[in-house]
Structure formats: structure tokens, C-alpha cells
Image: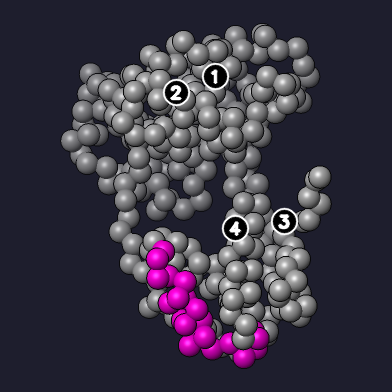
Amino acid sequence: MKDNRKYWESSNENISIETRRILNEYFLSLKLANKAEATITKYRRILEKFLCECLVPLESLTSEDVLKWLTEFAEDKKERTVDLYLSCLSSFFQFCLSEDYMENMVIKKRWRPKISQTLPKYLTEEEYARVRLAAESLSVRDRAIILFLFSSGCRRGEVCNLSIADITLKKRTAKVIGKGKKVRYIHFSIMCAIVLKEYLQTRDCEETAPLFMNRFGKPLGPGGILKIINDLGKKAGLNQSLHPHVCRHTFATNMLARGADLAFIADEMGHADLNTTRIYARIPTEDMIIAYQNKMG
């Protein structure tokens, strides 16, 4: 049976009617700000958990109440999980403050755990070569997906949402709808264009149809793409698991190694903040030099 519940609304009956009304106002504000469905769903789950376990009314809530709940919650949790919950709670309380549902901010900045920024996981030149070799034995659709991910830097969800009409093979560009429903135009490689053309010749459908379909004639979903990429990593004998974001990180490191500037890479990847892209510049210089020499001579 299909769940008709709106993802931006909480229907949790363990939360008081008045608090739930405020909560749903907050979720609606996120939706109107074009926050991704996955983000709103995640925030709903976090806030429902907090409001079901911390039973102090919003108007009476104090920093001590929040800290007590947070301390118990964080006991066996990773720092990144605690940081996510704090970000979500802080966002909700800031909304309540601006709408006069609360009088004071009950989250303290000093509570945020210090998280060391890890480098993105990407494929080395040798690993990338093994993946490309393993991909040659796959179906034309799967090869097209793999080449598109590695040469465009697109997110998995963005690829799922592409239609045939979004692709311009001659110019090797695609119209992509990214986070916050922002439209951008990305590029893909010559080899990707060749394989995409070959794949589309096996299809008999309208330009409005999804670019990638499953064997049942339905749009290929995120889970389908994840399985294709995971299976390819195993086939290539990689020591790490291969997932779509590794393709995205590999695209960025390869572009940087070829001499592309960070602003261009940020535009291609749909990063709203250039600081998000700057992390790729922290990859060890030796790796970048070797990658550059392997590509450019």
C-alpha cells in the first residue's frame, strides 16, 4: 500500500498537537527553501526522536534539558552523528526563535564536536585503469552510466533524474537539476558520448523518457545505479568499496590534476560554496603530480 504522507509533515502522535504544528511549519519552510527531500526526511526523523524523548514543552525548554538528552544520546554515537543531530536541532530552534515560539537559543556552539576533515575517497590511476578495463565487459547501458559518472562528476540522484532531452550528444553537455533544484550544465567525455549514442540506439522512446531505464522499462533508480557501481568495484578487484560518490571524487581529483581551477570544478560539480571544492586541493601533492604526469606526460 502506498504511503500518502507528505514527507514535509510529521504525523507522530507522540508529539503534542501544538508542538507538531510548529514542527510542520518548520518543515514547510525547508520545503519552500528548496531543501532536498532526503534532507527534510532526515531532519524529520531526528526531530521526532528528540521531541518524543525530551518531553519538556518548547516554551519551557532550557539548555540543560537539551544537554541532558544529548549527553545520553551521544554515549555510543560517532562524532559526525552527534554533529548532525546538533545541526538539525540548532536549525529548528533558530526557526522557533525567529517565530517567537522560544525566547532563548538553547544550543551552545561549544557543544559541537571537533571533527577532523578527512580527504575524499577517490581512485588512484592504477585503480581507475582496472575499473575501466572491468567495465568493458558490461552491457552498453552500464558502461554509459559508468563513463557518465566518471567524466561528469554528477551525483547519483542527478543521473537518475536525467531525461533523453537533457542530453546533447554533439556538444557533450547535459542539463542537470542539482541540490535546491538549481539547474546547471555539465560536460562528459567523447567516449561517454559514443557509448551513450550506442545505448540510445537500442531504445525506442520519446525524448521526455528517462535517460537510463531498468530491464522492466521503468526509470533506473538510485539503488540500481549503486548496485552497478558496487558490482563493478568487486569485478575490478578493488580493496575499497566502489560507490557513486567515489566516481564523483575521482572526477574532481582528475580535473585538478589536469590543471582545472577550483572555480571550474565547483561549477561542474554543483558546489554552492567554493570551500567544499577546496578539500580536493588538500590531496597529497605527490599523488597530484603523478596523476598529472600520467595524463599529460
Please tell me which of labels 2 and 4 falls first in the chain. 4
Q: Say few, some or many: other residues with alpha carbon within 10 Å of mark 2 (under 14 / 14 to 19 / 20 or more).
A: many
Residue 182, given in percent of the width and then of the height, sits at 62, 46
Q: Is residue 67 magenta?
A: yes
User: For the point 62% across and 86% down, which residue is it?
Assistant: 56
Q: Earlier in the sequence, mark 3 or mark 2?
A: 3
Find the magenta span and give its range. Answer: 57-77
Q: Pick whichever of labels 1 and 4 is earlier in the sequence.
A: 4
Q: Which residue is mark 2?
A: 232
Which mark is first along the chain, 2 or 1? 1
Residue 9 is covered by the magenta coloring = no
Q: CA distance from mark 2 to mark 4?
A: 29 Å
Give residue 292's position: percent from left, percent from top.
26, 27
Q: Who comes first in sequence, dot 4 or dot 3?
A: 3
Disc 2 secondary structure class: helix
Q: Residue at x 63, y 40 (%)?
A: 177
If you read the primary sequence from the N terminus, does the residue marked by circle 1 or circle 3 appear first?
A: 3
Q: Amino acid at mark 4?
A: Lys
Residue at which label 4 appears: 42
Q: Amino acid at mark 3?
A: Tyr
Residue annotated with mark 3: 7
> Where is mark 1, residue-wise?
142
- Measured as percent of width and height from the top left, residue 230 is found at 46, 29
Three-letter amino acid code of the residue under disc 1: Asp
Judge depth for marks 1 and 2 and give the one in front: 2
Residue 101 figure quarter: bottom right
- Structural distance between the alpha carbons of marks 1 and 3: 31 Å
Name the image quarter holding the C terminus: top left
117 vs 87: above or below:
above
